[in-house]
Image (cartoon, rainbow, N blue to C red):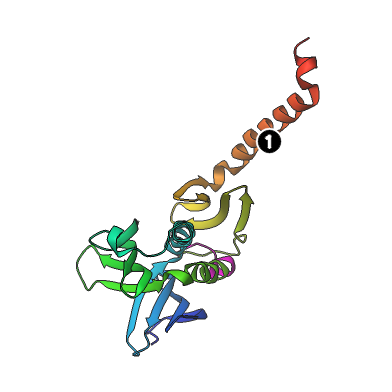
Amino acid sequence: QQQAGEQELATKMLQIQSKRFYIDVKQNRRGRFMKVAEIGADGRRNQVFLALSTAAEFRDHLSLFSDFYANLGPPNPDTLPEDGKLKSETMVKDNRRYYLDLKENSRGRFLRVSQTIARGGPRCQIAIPAQGMIEFRDALQELLDEFGTDDGGYKGELPEGRHMRVENKNFYFDIGQNNRGIYMRISEVKTNFRTAITIPEKSWSRFRDIFSDYVDKMKDGAEKGPSESNK
């Protein structure tokens, strides 16, 4: 359902077990965002809204939840927490708060994503079957690759995001823009761990120079070798 002044830029549909999920990238006068709609087997519809920067954070959390889920043993009702929660995380964006809960009940394991608004209003939530978290993350990544992580005030073309895997860590490099200017967000994701730093564009050159200096020093040290350095 299209709101007045709202433009749909892209959409993806995922079929995960008996549910269909539609991930739409939309744009209105406030900027770009994602709408995630869940359609159950009974036709019931639930949806949440994510700023693009929040969608990038959600992507990182999906990697962590997937790793955690992959290391879980088979379901055991005797060891299940009373509230059914196996792992939980929180995301905050402006006046919105998101609760991510990997849960287990008699129907299986699933990731519940709940969205609340600080000034009140209905609580919105969707539930992603745990087996589909990787597929969901990959769909998010494809849309973020195309549209970036900038929420609004888009001026010109920003470089595409990059991804690098080193041993058991994933590094994501995302270029975004807010009311303070352009920035680079570097996220490090590994099992049960996620951290990120944000580097303003005006300091990229200095950051590069320091990084390059360390690379050169380590290279020089390796070329000299221990025997030469001990003379």
Q: How crowded is mark 1: few (under 14 residues within 10 Å), some or many (20 or more)?
A: few
Q: Between residue 158 and residue 74, name the one nearer to us.
A: 74
User: Residue 11, how many percent across, how many down?
Assistant: 51, 80
Q: Between residue 190 and residue 130, name the one nearer to us.
A: 130
| Left or right side of 63 for 39 | left
Where does the C terminus fall, quadrant-wise?
Answer: top right
| Left or right side of 100 for 16 | right
Residue 115 visible? The answer is yes
Residue at x 59%, y 59% (from the top left corner): 161
Q: What element carries label 1?
A: helix
User: Residue 33, how many percent across, how many down?
Assistant: 43, 70
User: Residue 84, how many percent across, how many down?
Assistant: 28, 63
Above or below: residue 84 compared with residue 5: above
Query: Toward which corner of the image does residue 42 lie, by quadrant?
Result: bottom left
Above or below: residue 231 compared with residue 3: above
Above or below: residue 87 compared with residue 196: below
Query: Toward which corner of the image does residue 162 lie, by quadrant?
Result: bottom right
User: Residue 206, how many percent across, how many down?
Assistant: 60, 37
Residue 94 visible? The answer is no
Residue at x 47%, y 56% (from the top left corner): 71
Where does the N terminus fall, quadrant-wise?
Answer: bottom left
Q: Does the magenta stretch include residue 152?
A: no
The amino acid sitting under disc 1 is: Ser
Residue at x 56%, y 41% (from the top left corner): 203
Q: Residue furthest top?
A: 231
Residue at x 63%, y 48% (from the top left corner): 166
Q: Residue furthest bottom?
A: 43
Q: Bounds of the magenta span?
A: 143-151
Disc 1 designates what residue? Answer: 212
Q: Is residue 146 magenta?
A: yes
| Left or right side of 94 for 137 | right
